[in-house]
Image (spheres, helix red, strand yellow):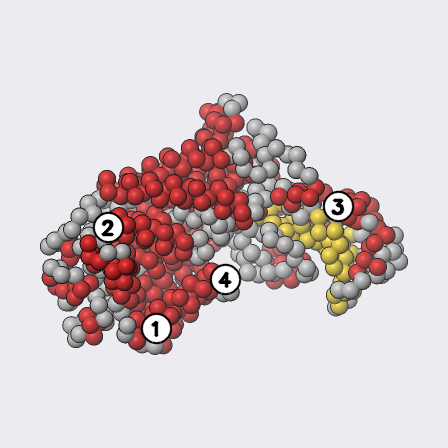
Amino acid sequence: MSVDILVVVLVVCVALVLFWTEALAVEMVALLALAVLMATGILTPDQAFSGFGDQALIMIASILVLSASLVRNGAGERIAHRIRRLSGGRAEFMAFALFGSVLAVSAFINNVAATAMFIPVAETLARAYRVRPSRLLMPVAYASLLGGVCTLTGTSTNVAVSGMLSRSGFEPLGVFELTPIGLPLAAVGLLYLVLISRFLPGRAGREDEASNKDIRRVFITELVVEEGSPAVGRNLREMALWKNFRLSPIGLIRGAARLSAGVLDTHLRAGDVVVVEGDAAAINRGAQAVGLTRKRSRKAVAATGGEPALVEATISYDSPLIGRTLAEVDPRSRYGVDVIAVWRRGGSIVEKVGRIVLRLGDDLLILGPLDRIRQIAKDPLNLLLDDRVLPRYDARKEWLSLLIFFLAVLAGATGTVPIPLAFLAGAMGVILAGCMTLEEAYRSLNLKLIVLIGAMIGVSVAIQQTGTATWVAERLVHLLGGHSAAPLLLLACMYWLTVLLTQSMSNAAAALVVLPVALSTAAQIGAPARPFAITVAVAASLAFMTPLEPACLLVMSTGRYRFRHFLRYGTPLTVTCFALLMLLIPLHYSLQDVAGKDAAASAPRISGARSVSSGPVLEQGLPGNVVPGHEAVGDLLHDP
């Protein structure tokens, strides 16, 4: 093993640990990995940052804008109406129509945006058919992931894989190239989702109080002891907040000090702040009964007018609130509403509400004028609100968004214009047509995702050009039987390696780590590279077994699921997809030895890599030197 390979292996391993532990933001981890690779001389600055000029990022940004235009202009509301008409009074038909609609939509727009669009739809249908939302929400997230593997535009991971294929000297993926593989997976997955929707937790509605946290959102809020309140001089134990109101005191703040010992027996004073845990109804009922006041701004409601409303909202995947505290955001000034409580899956937050650093999937209890709340509800990419306060949408903008998106897909699929240009034109089209403003388009760009993919492309270049991918591929092939190893067995290894990585890190990051290894493995055994690349792209989207995928995080809080629910219902679906994929790949792609032109295509050509004509990189094991009979690979590596 050369020093360069050792450095790359160490950097990637440390990055994977940081991805898994979430010690740092994923985009920060990717940038740090890139910085280390530059500092050690593995990559030049031009090579390291070449990913940020990749056409894949332009296409991803364009798809995000087009997706946001569809979501913001009410495409989901129309779909909900159609589903109710088609399914009649049968809940099973409704579930089939709902999950099928999610599959169809997420095949063309970002899968997380599709999930955000369909959460209010699922809640509306759950109420109409008298079923628990938890029966529908997890399948909605899973359906969006399955739909994402059907076309190039279904997920940014597909676009990232396509971009890396192009950079490595292969043809990029076509718009519908994944469809023959993804459609059968989606069809079988749809049947599975309809089946498990009957058994998901919370459907019976007879849970006892001990297990009620699976079906209640327990918020953290602050109640103030005001001057003259009947609570002055009393202690929390005698108030019996839990016994009488199911309201649990978890802290007491007096001035700048937080009291941690003897909180229940401390006599309250005017100005004290009691931190309590309970659902929305308990907070309202308990606070009024014992003379405590919700800590909120009356000015915000009075200044804006309108009927005040109390609603729950979930922080969506593209929200500007993520990573910030309520004190920093100041929702009173920004939105004209008050956030009076916060709930987070996974345990109590013993912290002042204004100091809680917000995360994706956190739930907020919002108080404010109904017209302001409806204004916030227009942007489900930032906050997902109770569907009963959703605004009415402009039908003209909705149809224009659909038409422009359809034309972009059609132009890219038929080859009328290059695919990136088709979607860039579409993104500009929805802005020029007035479907969304330029400011809204900028807000719809998920900069964290763009930075992550741009940085990980640089890491992938390092994995390829140092020979790390070939080094790993050689050992994998040797372990499984040498150059006579069965291609299907190696495909299975690539699938499970990608699936396991994608459960705990970004789908795109997992794909860009595994893809160079997959391409080099194909070169080692003389097999075509394309089926290996497609296996990695599909596997990277199948993050069913944990709730760490953004689409699953969105429904985890809204549906009151636990981590174990995703493991229980996601594992069989992952195994089913694996078995079906191993049947489909050989049907659509040859896995036999290739020669000549195909052999050359089996080894990646690195765009912008260090010169290989001088020898050092070739000595580190790039495919052209290690695969007997693949002389054309060497020619590719020496191309100017």
Report the Cα–Cα distance between label 3 and label 1. 55 Å
For marks 1 and 4, give the CA distance.
Answer: 21 Å
Residue type indicated by callout 1: Val
**Mark in front: 2 vs 1:** 2
Q: Is residue 140 left or right of residue 605?
A: right
Mark number, residue 246: 3
Amino acid at circle 4: Thr
N-term-proximal mark, 2 vs 3: 3
Which image quadrant: the N terminus? Answer: bottom left
Q: Secondary structure at mark 4?
A: helix
SS class, disc 2: helix
Mark 3 crowdedness (10 Å alpha carbons): few <14, some 14-19, many ≥20: some
Which residue is identified by label 2? 487
- Quadrant, the C terminus: bottom left
Residue 497 locus on image (x, y percent): 36, 55
Q: Is residue 482 visible?
A: yes
Left or right: where 113 falls relative to 277: left
Quadrant position of residue 462: bottom left
- Which of these two is toward me, 423 or 170? 170
Q: Nearer the viewer, mark 2 or mark 4?
A: 2
The quadrant where residue 215 appears: top right
Left or right, 328 with reference to 21: right
Which is nearer the N-term, disc 2 or disc 1? 1
Which amino acid is tagged 3? Arg
Asked if one can make out residue 537 in the rendered structure from this viewpoint, the answer is no
Q: Crowding near pointer 1: few (<14 within 10 Å), some, many (20+)? A: some
Label 3 element class = loop
